[in-house]
Image (cartoon, rainbow, N blue to C red):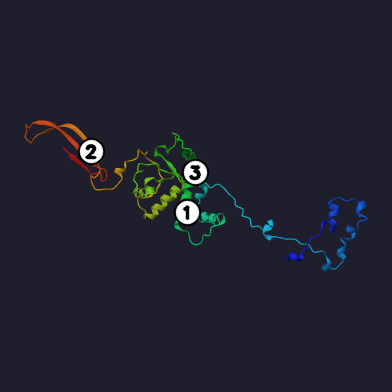
């Protein structure tokens, strides 16, 4: 490597190469001393050569700039199918999101993967899967349009929250429940992550049966679409309280009853009053 002070600039008037590059005939070159001998100061000592004053800022040299080139490719389910473990898939996506924070957002992130990063990776994987299987439904919800009649999600009353499609359900007013229980995240039943999630729950529950595995999975996600959802339950049905503090009343009758246990006892009309506790589902009957 050389230093900047070891380089000098030759002006156009003293540069023989500029004669040809700017157009010059043979009759002009034959008598041109600059072409045959060079500039006159070239015969002197180097200390007497003209000094050029060039201000070079290394920060604006294009060759010295650091450039980052990224290849952007749409992520589809084929990438997810390469993993056989739900936890490993989340950790790989967590490291990818960390790389974006460091290289693109210029954030300093060090140390092992944190819980918040795993949650962000889980949301990213679910978004990719939902957009791969239900792109038309998601676009319809974004545009506030009604889902088509042939959509399997129509009866589930889905809605979007932060780009995630959730089940509408009947527990909207159950504020004491966690959001994942009130409105589970929809997972396509034939997707790769559905198999990974169920396999992870199966191992977490020590190889429990299918009903226990599915029930524990549905506390947060809904990987299998089954029965349609009806209207929202009233808040009184969902708030825990003592028995019969909030109840429903129904009447039945008239019915024919005897006034006593005698064989020829008189017969009269009777009515039934049924009290149903909203919280415990206990039943009390009055005749």
Q: Count neighbours of disc 3 (C-alpha within 10 A) and say few if under 14, some if 14 to 19, many if 20 or more.
A: some
Q: In terms of depth relative to the viewer, which is nearer, 224 or 9?
A: 9
- The relative height of residue 181 versus residue 254 in the rendered view (above or below) is below
Q: Quadrant of the C terminus?
A: top left
Q: Earlier in the sequence, mark 3 or mark 2?
A: 3
Seen at 39% across and 52% down, the residue is: 201
Q: Earlier in the sequence, mark 1 or mark 2?
A: 1
For residue 148, what is the image quadrant?
top left
Looking at the image, residue 219 sits to the left or right of residue 38; the answer is: left
Looking at the image, residue 245 sits to the left or right of residue 196; the answer is: left
Label 1, secondary structure: give it.
helix
Query: Disc 1 vs disc 2: which is toward the camera?
Result: 2
Say which residue label 2 marks.
249
Say which residue label 3 marks.
131
For residue 245, what is the image quadrant?
top left
| Residue 241 in the image, given as x and y percentages of width and height | 26, 48
Disc 3/disc 1 C-alpha distance (Å):
18 Å
């Amino acid at each position: 490597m050389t230093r900047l002070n070891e380089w000098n600039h030759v002006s156009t008037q003293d540069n023989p190469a500029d004669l040809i590059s700017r157009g010059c005939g043979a009759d002009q070159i034959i008598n041109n001393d600059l072409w045959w001998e060079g500039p006159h100061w070239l015969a002197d000592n180097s200390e007497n050569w003209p000094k050029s004053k060039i201000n070079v800022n290394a920060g604006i040299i294009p060759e010295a700039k650091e450039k980052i080139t990224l290849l952007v490719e749409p992520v589809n389910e084929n990438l997810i199918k390469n993993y056989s473990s739900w936890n490993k898939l989340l950790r790989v996506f967590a490291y990818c999101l960390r790389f974006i924070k460091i290289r693109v957002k210029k954030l300093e992130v060090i140390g092992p993967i944190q819980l918040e990063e795993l949650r962000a990776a889980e949301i990213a994987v679910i978004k990719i899967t939902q957009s791969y299987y239900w792109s038309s439904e998601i676009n319809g919800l974004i545009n506030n349009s009604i889902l088509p009649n042939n959509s399997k999600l129509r009866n589930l009353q889905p809605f979007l929250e932060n780009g995630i499609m959730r089940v509408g359900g009947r527990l909207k007013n159950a504020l004491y429940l966690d959001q994942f229980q009130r409105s589970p995240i929809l997972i396509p039943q034939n997707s790769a992550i559905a198999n990974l999630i169920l396999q992870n729950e199966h191992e977490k529950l020590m190889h429990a049966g299918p009903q226990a595995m599915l029930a524990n999975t549905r506390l947060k996600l809904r990987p299998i679409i089954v029965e349609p959802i009806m209207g929202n339950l009233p808040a009184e049905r969902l708030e825990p309280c003592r028995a019969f503090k909030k109840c429903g009343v129904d009447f039945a009758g008239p019915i024919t009853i005897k006034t006593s246990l005698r064989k020829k006892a008189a017969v009269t009309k009777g009515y039934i009053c049924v009290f149903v506790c909203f919280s415990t589902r206990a039943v009390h009957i009055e005749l």
